[in-house]
Image (tube, rainbow, N blue to C red):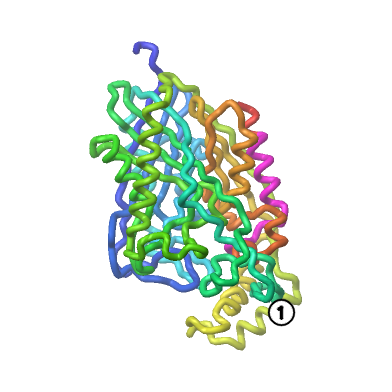
C-alpha cells in the first residue's frame, strides 16, 4: 500500500428547509406544511495525488447558473478545488426549497441565501475525510419505473401550445385525457449507472447512483421530501450494512421526457403517499446492491477532467409576439392567478416578457469526468432520454452515465426533431430557451471531450 495514491472522502450536510419555505418549481408556488424526511447536499471528493475532483449533488429542483458559479467560487476559495473540477448538480427534487423562480413559482430568498454555505461545507467535510480508497463502477437495467411522459394523441385531440397558439403533435402528461392516448412519443433509458467507493480497509465510503427518472411526486405538493433520491440513499446504506458515515447519492440522468406517471395503467401502483417513492428507491438500491457483488475493484484509478463552454443562442419572442404577450398580460389579472382556463396562457405571456430581457447568447458548460473505468458526462439542463442513450452508445470501452442539471441551468434542451413536435418541454420560456440545435451541439461537444481520455 506504500504506492497507493487514490484517496476518497464523502459527506452529507442537512439542508432541510423550515416550515413555510417556498417549495419546488411549478405553475404555482407551494409552501412547506409537512416535513416528511430530511434533505441533504452530498459531496464525493476523490484525488490521485495530482488531481482532486468533487461531485456534489443537491436535493433541490433546479439551481441557476449564477448561483452555481458563486458556489463553485466559494468551493475554490475554501478547498482549492478548481471550478472546472467540480461537478455540481441538482437532482431535480420537487419537494425541496425553491432557489430559482420560473413559471408561476417564486424564489425563497432566505433559503436561497443559506444554501451556498451548506453546499461548500459538504465539500470541505468530504475533503477532510480523504483516505486511501478503491472504486468500482457498473450499471444495471431497471426498465419498469421509467415511462415516456410525452404522448401521441388520437385524432381529434388538440394539444394547445400556449406560446404559438397552434396545436402540438405531442402532449406532455395528458391528465384527464388518458382515453385519447395513441401511444408514447419517446423511449426511456432503463440504466442505473453507479460508482462505488470503499476504503482499502473495506469500509464503505459512498455509492453514487444515476437514473433517468424525473421525481416521483407521490406526496402532497406542500411536502418536504427527498423523494426516491433519498430512499435510494437510505436503502443502499441499509443493504450494504454501512455505517453512519456512509454517503449514498442518487443523481438525475437524462429524464426531461421521462417519469413514472403511468397514464395507460393508472392502477399499477399504490395511491398511498410516499409508497411509490419508497418502492422505486428501494428497488434501485437492491439492484445496485446485487450488482456490486460482481464488480471489479480498482485500487489506483486514474483521474481526469475535460471542460469547455459553448456560447449558444437564446430563443426569444419576435417583436409581434412580444407585443401580443404584453397586451394579453396587461389585460389579465396575474396577481389572482388560479386554476382557471387561461392560467397557462397567462403564465407563458409573462414568460415571454421576462425571457426577452435575457442576453442573446448564454454559455453552456460541458464537462466529462473520468474516474478509472468510468466516465461521467455532465450537461447543463434537462435533456431527453434519447440524448443519454445516444451518448451511452457512442462511449465504448468505459462504463458511462450522464448527470443532468449540472454546472449551469439552460432549461429543457430537447433534440431538434422533438422541438418540432412541441409539447411542454419545448414551450419557449425561461424553462426552455435554447436554440433549436442546442442539444446536438452540446452532445457533440461532450463526445469530443470524452474522446480526449
Going by the image, does 417 lie left or right of 42?
right
Q: Looking at the rendering, in which quadrant would you find the N terminus?
A: top left
| Relative depth, front residue between 264 and 401 | 264
Q: What element carries label 1?
A: helix
Q: Which residue is drawn at 62% across and 39% down?
A: 391
Q: Position of residue 182 (x, y in %)?
A: 62, 65
The vertical placement of 184 against 193, above or below, is below
Q: Magenta region: which residues?
A: 430-448
Q: Where is residue 194 in the image (x, y as percent from the top left)?
A: 44, 36
Q: Can residue 330 be seen in this view?
A: yes
The vertical placement of 426 against 175, above or below, is above
Q: In which quarter of the image is residue 409?
A: bottom right
The vertical placement of 438 against 22, above or below, is above
Query: Is 440 part of what is drawn in magenta?
Result: yes
Q: In which quarter of the image is residue 413?
A: bottom right
Q: Position of residue 410 (x, y in %)?
A: 59, 55
| Relative depth, front residue between 277 and 17 | 277
Q: Residue at x 70, y 62 (%)?
A: 421
Q: Position of residue 99 (x, y in %)?
A: 44, 61
Q: Is residue 357 visible?
A: no
The vertical placement of 163 against 272, above or below, is below
Amino acid at each position: 500500500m506504500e504506492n497507493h495514491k487514490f484517496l476518497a472522502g464523502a459527506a452529507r450536510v442537512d439542508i432541510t428547509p423550515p416550515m413555510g419555505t417556498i417549495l419546488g418549481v411549478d405553475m404555482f408556488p407551494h409552501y412547506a406544511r409537512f416535513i416528511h424526511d430530511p434533505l441533504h447536499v452530498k459531496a464525493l471528493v476523490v484525488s490521485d495525488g495530482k488531481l482532486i475532483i468533487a461531485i456534489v449533488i443537491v436535493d433541490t429542483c433546479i439551481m441557476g447558473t449564477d448561483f452555481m458559479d458563486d458556489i463553485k467560487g466559494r468551493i475554490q476559495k475554501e478547498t482549492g478545488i478548481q471550478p472546472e473540477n467540480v461537478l455540481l448538480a441538482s437532482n431535480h427534487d420537487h419537494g425541496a426549497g425553491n432557489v430559482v423562480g420560473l413559471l408561476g413559482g417564486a424564489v425563497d430568498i432566505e433559503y436561497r441565501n443559506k444554501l451556498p454555505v451548506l453546499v461548500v461545507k459538504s465539500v470541505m467535510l468530504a475533503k477532510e475525510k480523504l483516505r486511501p480508497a478503491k472504486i468500482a463502477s457498473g450499471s444495471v437495467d431497471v426498465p419498469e419505473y421509467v415511462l415516456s411522459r410525452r404522448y401521441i394523441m388520437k385524432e381529434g385531440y388538440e394539444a394547445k401550445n400556449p406560446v404559438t397558439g397552434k396545436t402540438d403533435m405531442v402532449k406532455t402528461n395528458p391528465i384527464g385525457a388518458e382515453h385519447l392516448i395513441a401511444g408514447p412519443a419517446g423511449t426511456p433509458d432503463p440504466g442505473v449507472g453507479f460508482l462505488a467507493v470503499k476504503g482499502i480497509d473495506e469500509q464503505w465510503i459512498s455509492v453514487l447512483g444515476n437514473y433517468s427518472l424525473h421525481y416521483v411526486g407521490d406526496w402532497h405538493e406542500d411536502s418536504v421530501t427527498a423523494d426516491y433520491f433519498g430512499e435510494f440513499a437510505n436503502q443502499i446504506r441499509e443493504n450494504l450494512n454501512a455505517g453512519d458515515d456512509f454517503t449514498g447519492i442518487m443523481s438525475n440522468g437524462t429524464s426531461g421526457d421521462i417519469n413514472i406517471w403511468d397514464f395507460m395503467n393508472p392502477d399499477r401502483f399504490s395511491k398511498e403517499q410516499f409508497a411509490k417513492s419508497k418502492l422505486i428507491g428501494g428497488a434501485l438500491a437492491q439492484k445496485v446492491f446485487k450488482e456490486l457483488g460482481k464488480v471489479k475493484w480498482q485500487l489506483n484509478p486514474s483521474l481526469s477532467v475535460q471542460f469547455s463552454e459553448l456560447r449558444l443562442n437564446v430563443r426569444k419572442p419576435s417583436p409581434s409576439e412580444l407585443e401580443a404577450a404584453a397586451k394579453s398580460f396587461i389585460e389579465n389579472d396575474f396577481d389572482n392567478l388560479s386554476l382557471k382556463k387561461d392560467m397557462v396562457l397567462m403564465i407563458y405571456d409573462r414568460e415571454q416578457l421576462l425571457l426577452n430581457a435575457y442576453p442573446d447568447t448564454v454559455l453552456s458548460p460541458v464537462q466529462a469526468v473520468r474516474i478509472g473505468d468510468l466516465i461521467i458526462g455532465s450537461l447543463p439542463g434537462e435533456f431527453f432520454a434519447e440524448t443519454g442513450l445516444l451518448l451511452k452508445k457512442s462511449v465504448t470501452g468505459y462504463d458511462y452515465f450522464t448527470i443532468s442539471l449540472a454546472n449551469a441551468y439552460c432549461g429543457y434542451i430537447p433534440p431538434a426533431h422533438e422541438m418540432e413536435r412541441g409539447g411542454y418541454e419545448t414551450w419557449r420560456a425561461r424553462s426552455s430557451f435554447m436554440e433549436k440545435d442546442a442539444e446536438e451541439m452540446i452532445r457533440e461537444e461532450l463526445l469530443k471531450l470524452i474522446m480526449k481520455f
